[in-house]
Image: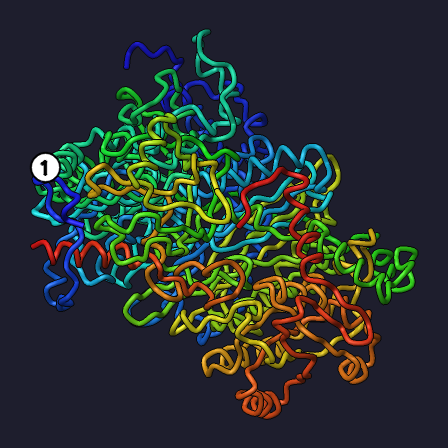
Amino acid sequence: MAESLSATEVPLVGDFSQTPSNDSLKDVRVGVITFPGTLDDRDASRAVRAAGGTAVELWHDDADLKNVDAVIIPGGFSYGDYLRAGAIAAKAAVMSKVIDAAQSDNALPVLGICNGFQILTESHLLPGSMIKNDHRKFICRDQILRIDNNETPWTSEFEKGQEIVVPLKNQDGQYVAEQKVLDALEAENRVVFRYVGFNPNGSRNDIAGITNARGNVVGLMPHPEHAIEAGFGPSSSGFGDVDLRGGADGLGIFTSALHNIINVK
Amino acid sequence: MSEKQFNLDTVEHAAATPDTELPWAELGLKENEFNDVVELLGRRPTAAELAMYSVMWSEHCSYKSSKIHLKQFGQKVTDEMKKDLMVGMGENAGVTNIGNGWAVTFKIESHNHPSYVEPYQGAATGVGGIVRDIISMGARPVAVMDPLRFGAIDHPDTARVVPGVVSGVGGYGNSLGLPNIGGEVEFDECYQANPLVNALAVGIMRHEDIRLANASGVGNKVILFGARTGGDGIGGASVLASESFDDTKPSKRPAVQVGDPFAEKVLIECCLELFKGSVVEGIQDLGAAGISCATSELASNGEGGMHVDLTKVLLRDPTLTPGEILMSESQERMMAVVTPEKLATFEEIMKKWDVEYSVLGEVTDTGRLIIEWDGEVIVDVDPKTVAHDGPTYERPYSRPEWQDDVQANHFTGSDADDARPEGAELAKAICDFMASPNLCDKSWVTNQYDRYVQGNTALSQPDDSGVIRVDEETGAGVALATDASPRYTYLDPYEGARASLAEAYRNVSTVGARPVAVSDCLNFGSPEDPDVMWQFVEAVRGIADGCMELGVPVTGGNVSLYNQTGGKAINPTPVVAMMGVMDDVTRRTPSGWQKTHDGQAIYLLGTTADELDGSEWARFKGHLGGLPPKVDLAVEKELGDILVNLSRDGMIDSAHDVSSGGLIAALSEACLRFNVGARIGLGEVAERDGVDTFTLLFSESMGRVVVSVPRSEEVRFKDMCTARNFPFARIGVVDAESGELAIQGETTVKLDELRAAWSATMPDRFGEVAQG
């Protein structure tokens, strides 16, 4: 895998021959940003803790990233989404630091969920943008996703082609981009998550989540942080095949990141 | 401020001009009420005082028609019922101790009239208002629920109101990060021009964080913070035109408030930070009657006096008159009382969250609420007379003359009871019945609400109650259900209200929670109509007596009167919200059987009588008459106890309450929940209860629940029911392979056909939304 990366880039997928101890996972600091109007910050922090890491609160006008090893931009309606979803948050002080760190040699792993994905496109860390759902309504459902790229730090513990169920909830979730951008994303294997069975918002190419060219920045509309704990997650794959609200497929996204960071450290 | 061109009506001026005509009638005051104001003040009120008294003495704020009856909720309680009640009625919301240092506050309120005028904003600000009540108690809001009632599903105006209300509830609640975990949706022509939009919010806090609305400590600062004050939600105040001679001023202020959920979300976090640092002495949200209400209530609940400079209020619209500022119902505002020492900390927190604030004045011990405008006194009143000493009416009430005729008109044998389907016809009838507006799939509504945010939702619609985890360490949490039986209540208000209470109690215990507290939202027609007033009095008595019997206190609520169009009142609609507690929310029982439950036994708890009056089947056939099902709260209490124990001891895997639509609806829903079929045999139960199969399927007798029991638990299950002498009957088995609901000897319904009919109704009428 490392061979395919250019010399300036660090390997993003680590060597798992040795399972890191829980103690060392605790040393991994994952920043979770709160903007005014952010809603899922506490959930994202809970997901980091559930995966074994340490969640670090970041505030929208923080001037530094408090030495974190990765950043999550959680969902919500930052600044009310009164302009375009994510547009104002993309200009926040903390975001300029996130942009720098994501593009630096260290290639800070960044995950944007829902509004966080919108903020990443508004920040131009990811291409394309999100417009209103094709049906024009807010939608909340248990969504099947396929992992089309398991080479990012956020998806390395999944099999390529694996299907997972996580909740989806949004108003502006229709992913759109110019055809040449879509073509490039497909050609470069940068579609990370794809909607399966049902496209809930009219996204182009059934795209639910993508990554940047280096693979360290990932954005997705559905909410893996709401699928980390049996009893409070989605009801997997529709009707009753598994436990009611038993879905915890989202946890793999957070454990992937923690393990990658440990292995790089 | 001198650029303002008002004929400022000062206290001094009022005293000097006793004969000035005032628009008290236009502001909704009755002549005797206006005279009372004059007598209280010893002079005519100023325009600003008139504005305050008129809104605070309105039915909505003063409960003047209902107060004497609502007292029962405080009287019909035992010490045992008060044991866990930390804050009772009269505050913004009641607070219940749920153990381990945790307290829960919840309340249900109406926002009916605004939601008809402007469905989106009316519903949105309904959510906003109830959430601020919860924050005012010091709690973090953790969930909302919305019981909604609309006109006939096929009426053209319903297609305007439903999408607006649903997207308003969703648009506001989703943006606040509050999971919407349940509620109800009912369609009935009686709500045609008067939809009911009720909103419930629940919040949690540690015991030490409870805050009350009072202004104590002389010299403490009175601060208004949050959104600026604008001209929205003023309604009647614009008739105070005499106060202004500025021709450029908008002549009519909008009566419906406009919501800004982002401002409210910021306000929530900002308030929680204030509470965490114990920065505020008292806090009050601004809802109905705005600053009038907040200042008079804070002052009269504290040291009794307050001095306020109204010119300090930050305005969105500089042309507002003092009276309008006092009455404005602009959303997303709070009032806090802060010691001078903590003012700097307060200011820091405001700055962090970018929230605007202004210090309006301070707490005094004069016993007077003094409000100044530009250095002149425009209000000088005893705040208690504004907030608490409003008029109280003993409205005349009497049993309507038509009540006997209605009760004599039983469904069985009526013209509407023309054909009771059998065989293949029955299967078709069941599909049509389950597709009827009040039984059909409501995911069109609930899929527009976020049920996941905060990560603590253990159950939500369509299960019997919403369940939220409170304590992440122990897994303890609460269950909430709302229920109303307006058709029963129309037939017999006392029994109907008790039926609502019984159903809410049953819904909470069905998921495995122990019911502990009630909040109610009493939606009725005009109290000036003795027939309606009788319905109200009977319903209140029914709930109060019922709560006493069940041992669950009413902790708060709201009354909404004048719900009628022309002379026709809505069906009396007391909505009961019940809260229950659970030690471990992961033990919650869902409302249907799952594939892994193949072969489990299905039991019916309780007995069935011929009680089709007021039922869903009667509505399906266009009939409303007779007597509602009999309510036996001792039975409900026993059943609740059994359900909680069954859940705790792992003896059942599913439980679903039998109510609207009877046993056939309960069985259909239990199959549809996870798309798993069942084989049912009703012969023995029908014989035991002495009813025919049709009655057994469609009757709405109370005190019944369908459960599925693992084979390994059947003996224990039967022993428990037998020991408690509670009637139970094995009526079938879960069948994961068939894809059918088969009722032996009667009919077989294919689940895919049933689902297609059941799920098409709302999308067909209101447009497709993405499937759940």
> What SS does tag 1 mark?
loop
In the image shown, does B153 or A150 lie closer to the viewer?
Answer: A150
Q: Position of residue A64 (x, y in %)?
A: 8, 39
In the rendered structure, which amino acid carries the disc numbered 1? Ser
Q: Is residue A206 above or below residue B200?
A: above
In the image shown, does A86 or B585 lie closer to the viewer?
Answer: A86
At x 28%, y 29%, the residue is A122
Work out whether residue B433 can be spotted. yes
Rendered image coloring scheme = rainbow
In the image shown, does A27 or B394 lie closer to the viewer?
Answer: A27
Q: Position of residue B603 (x, y in %)?
A: 64, 80
At x 76%, y 82%, the residue is B685
Q: Position of residue A229 (x, y in %)?
A: 34, 64
Q: Is residue B81 above or below residue B185?
A: below
Asked if residue B336 lies left or right of residue B653, the reply is left
Asked if residue B647 lies left or right of residue B310, the reply is right
> Callout 1: few (<14), some (14-19), or many (20+) C-alpha neighbours within 10 Å?
few
At x 44%, y 48%, the residue is B450
Asked if residue B598 lies left or right of residue B435, the reply is left
Q: Is residue A156 above or below residue A73?
A: below
Q: Is residue A129 above or below residue B539?
A: above
At x 84%, y 58%, the residue is B404
Which residue is under mark 1?
A104
Work out whether residue B605 can be spotted. no
Q: Residue furthest top?
A: B247
Quarter of the image with the C terminus of chain A in it: bottom left
